[in-house]
Image: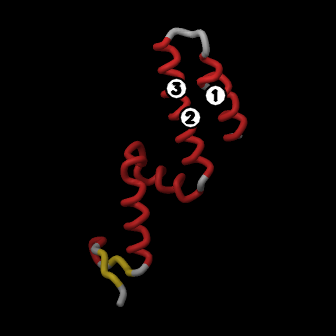
């Protein structure tokens, strides 16, 4: 389903399909194509999709921080009130 939706949207918004159209329309289509590619990248990769589900729209800015915090948490444990305690 993801691939078929991606293909349909890419066919509509791909820069090669915008030749001869007004510059503002070409610019919007290029921006939309970037968004489509980013969405496909998130939805098709399980770890990135889980990160997006957790942090939402700030995903693109917070993904590396989220990934790093999950790695740290997996090497320790959370105590009372959610405080993180590393394991030694």
- The residue under the point 57% across, 38% down is 37
Q: Residues within 10 Å of mark 3 (few under 14, many from 20)?
A: some
Asked whether the residues under the numbered discs 1 and 2 touch, taking CB atoms below 8 Å apart as contact, a structural biologist would say yes
Q: Is residue 16 above or below residue 79?
A: above
Q: Which residue in the protein does label 2 denote?
A: 36
- Where 66 sits versus 33, above or below? below
Query: Who comes first in sequence, dot 1 or dot 2?
Result: 1
The colour style of the image is secondary structure
Question: Which of 33 and 56 lies nearest the eye of the viewer?
Answer: 33
Q: Quadrant of residue 20?
A: top right
Residue 8 x, y percent position in the rendering = 69, 28
**In terms of depth relative to the viewer, which is nearer, 80 or 48?**
48
Q: The residue tagged with tag 1: helix, strand or loop?
A: helix
Q: Position of residue 80 (x, y in %)?
A: 28, 77
Q: Any mark on residue 21, and which?
A: none
The residue under label 1 is 9
Tag in front: 3 or 1 = 3
- The residue shown at (31%, 75%) is 84
Of the 4 image quadrants, the one containing the C terminus is bottom left
Q: Quadrant of residue 69?
A: bottom left
Where in the figure is residue 76, as x and y percent of width and height?
38, 81
Q: Is residue 5 left or right of residue 50?
A: right
- Estimate the spatial distance between the alpha carbons at disc 1 and disc 2, rounded to whole Å: 7 Å
Determine which residue is flagged by label 3. 30
Disc 2 crowd, CA 10 A, few/some/many (<14, 14-19, 20+): some
Question: Where is 29 relative to 20, above or below?
Answer: below
**Displayed quadrant of residue 15:** top right
Residue at point 59%, 57% (across, down): 46
Q: Earlier in the sequence, mark 3 or mark 1?
A: 1
CA gap between label 2 and label 3 equals: 10 Å
Q: Are marks 2 and 3 in contact (CB under 8 Å)?
A: no
């Amino acid at each position: 389903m993801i691939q078929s939706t991606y293909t349909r949207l890419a066919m509509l918004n791909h820069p090669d399909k915008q030749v001869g159209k007004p510059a503002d329309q070409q610019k919007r289509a290029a921006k939309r194509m970037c968004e489509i590619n980013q969405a496909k990248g998130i939805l098709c990769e399980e770890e990135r999709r889980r990160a997006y589900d957790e942090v939402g729209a700030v995903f693109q800015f917070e993904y590396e921080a989220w990934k790093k915090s999950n790695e740290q948490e997996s090497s320790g444990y959370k105590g009372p009130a959610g405080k993180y305690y590393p394991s030694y």
